[in-house]
Image (cartoon, rainbow, N blue to C red):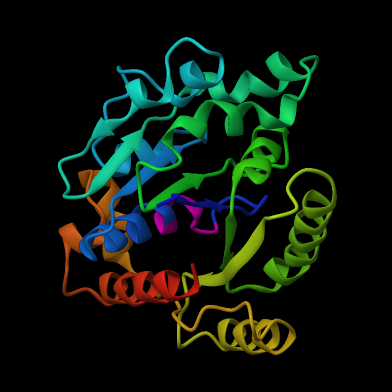
Amino acid sequence: MKSKKVIFYNQKGGVGKTTSAVNLGSALADLNKKVLLIDFDAQCNLTGAVSGDLRKANIYQVIVGQVPAASAVQSTIFKNLYLIPGSLDVAGLSIELVNENNREYFLKTVLEPLDEDYDYILLDCPPSLGLETMNALAWADYVIIPLQCEYLAMEGLNLIMRTISNVKKSLNPNIKILGILFTMYSKRALLNQQVVEDISQFFPELVFKTIIPRSVRISEAPSHGLPINYYDKSNNGSKAFAELAKEVVSRA
């Protein structure tokens, strides 16, 4: 069975891309899905959030042809959850690849051998629209758009939609938006409620029913190298990601 390839994309930083990738991946693994996480952000936060080893082979070495993708995959301490670590060197890929032929398809080419090894491959994009992100968009089957519940997120969403539309026309005709995921939601903030209502009105088919709450425990978990369902399974955030995993399975 072919892996379902999902990226977490938003050109704005601090919206919960990495948190969503880690915790959705772990929640899918809890559903007995075999999940590979790929850290494609030079900050390498995803790698640390699952206690990955940055000293071993990484996604940069895979892309530049130093190691095959399968050799860069690490087992994690969590059941059904695997990792290709990030690297600081990813930050320079745009410069290294700019003069290469088919430069938007390097990621697709090197990851192709993994296509049938996992139920889900989840990739955390950098917070930019550089060549790294274009490679991710050219490779993916699905996009999850994490969106913080604030006014500026609504303006940024228009740019995201245009970008994905352009990618569909020029690089990857099969890419689909799996869903818009509201993150860091507070019931007490009227603005949060308004943003959710407005975007849900515009994109009723795209918005996930599950909303990820603002949670101190979710914020703490990465510092312990644990997904939220291992750090505090009873937390509302852990329950939300469990529900999100079920939604993702039903959509993809």
The verdict on residue 17 being magenta is yes
> What stretch of residues is rendered in magenta?
15-20
Relative to 73, 60 lies left or right = right
- Residue at image x 79%, y 66%? 158
The verdict on residue 106 being magenta is no
> Residue 186 at x, y = what percent?
45, 80
- Residue at image x 65%, y 62%? 176
Which of 188 and 252 lies nearest the eye of the viewer?
252
> Residue 60 at x, y = what percent?
50, 21
**Which quadrant of the view contains residue 76?**
top left
Which of 69 and 223 lies nearest the eye of the viewer?
69
> Residue 71 at x, y = what percent?
33, 21
Which of 32 and 98 lies nearest the eye of the viewer?
32
Relative to 46, 125 lies left or right = right
Residue 202 vs 126, above or below: the answer is below
Q: Main secondary structure of the magenta part?
A: helix
> Residue 153 at x, y = what percent?
68, 67
- Residue at image x 58%, y 40%? 126
Residue 197 vs 92, above or below: the answer is below
**Which quadrant of the view contains residue 48?**
top left
